[in-house]
Image: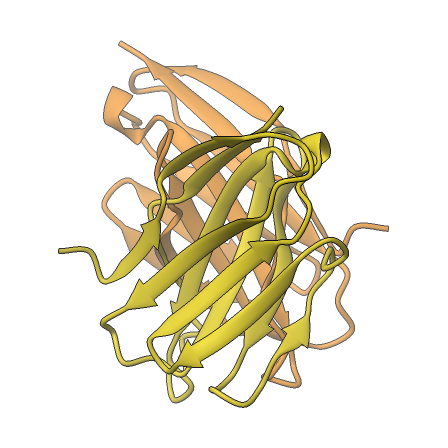
Amino acid sequence: DADVTQTPRNRITKTGKRIMLECSQTKGHDRMYWYRQDPGLGLRLIYYSFDVKDINKGEISDGYSVSRQAQAKFSLSLESAIPNQTALYFCATSDLDSNRGELFFGEGSRLTVL
Amino acid sequence: EDQVTQSPEALRLQEGESSSLNCSYTVSGLRGLFWYRQDPGKGPEFLFTLYSAGEEKEKERLKATLTKKESFLHITAPKPEDSATYLCAVQEDSGNTPLVFGKGTRLSVIA
């Protein structure tokens, strides 16, 4: 089983619908992140959390919200999806104590908003 | 202005043709510079961390180097399986700031 699991892997939805992308990890890491990847724009940070009580906005948080339900779970919500939120979404984790700053990524969730 | 700029955007090499990818950065204080590899439809995978100018790291056909303004990922005698997008990211020296990624270089190695 993957250390960082994202569900769903693929989702097609309509404009205005509420969507939740879920991420769970078995690495025991404190820090979790949601990134969005678009062709030509690279990886951009949406939200991040350094522990269960900590939530921080990233570069492109407008239109998104998150919930850190437990150390191992971090969900991303689109309250009212719009077509320009069509993208590949990645969850990642890192270890607070790691000097390497290495991120461990999930396999991605491809979202299409029609 | 982008903090991390990668060039070229895409690179096509013949098998065995060595080359370098560039990552320039403009953060005021660098805690670490990171290289990742991403295969199509997959999440990025960590390759290297570099912390200070002059540092080098190697893994198989890849060698990463760091100066005060840029990093290079040298690919020696590449093989088709080295085809991927290579991402560079930086972390500022506060240590609690998330990584900022460049847009990546898409490498194709042709047999």
In this orientation, which residue lies closer to the viewer: A72 or B61? A72
A87 to A55, vertically: above or below: above
Q: Nearer the viewer, residue B24 or A1?
A: A1
Q: Residue at x 34, y 34 (%)?
A: B76
In percent of width and height, residue B23 lies at: 62, 47
Between A14 and B79, the one lying in front of the other is A14
Q: Is residue A1 left or right of residue A30?
A: left
Name above or below for residue A22 compared with residue A48.
above
| Residue A74 sits above or below residue B13 on the image | below
| Image point (25%, 74%), residue name | A27
Q: Residue A39, located in which quarter of the rendered image? A: top right
Residue farthest to the top, as pictured: B111
Q: Position of residue A38 (x, y in %)?
A: 61, 35
Q: Residue at x 37, y 80 (%)?
A: A95
- Report how many numbered discs are placed on residues in the image: 0
From the viewer's perspective, is B85 left or right of A18? left
Residue B56 at least partly seen: no
Chain A's colour is yellow
Q: Residue furthest right?
A: B1
Q: Colour of chain B?
A: orange
Q: Quadrant of the N terminus of chain A?
A: bottom left
Residue B93 location, x and y as percent? 65, 81
Q: Answer left or right for B78 relative to A42.
A: left
- Could you tell me which quadrant the C terminus of chain A lies in? top right
Where's residue A106, x and y in %?
Answer: 35, 53
Quadrant of residue B79 within the rendered picture: top left
Residue plotted at (66% across, 41% down):
A81
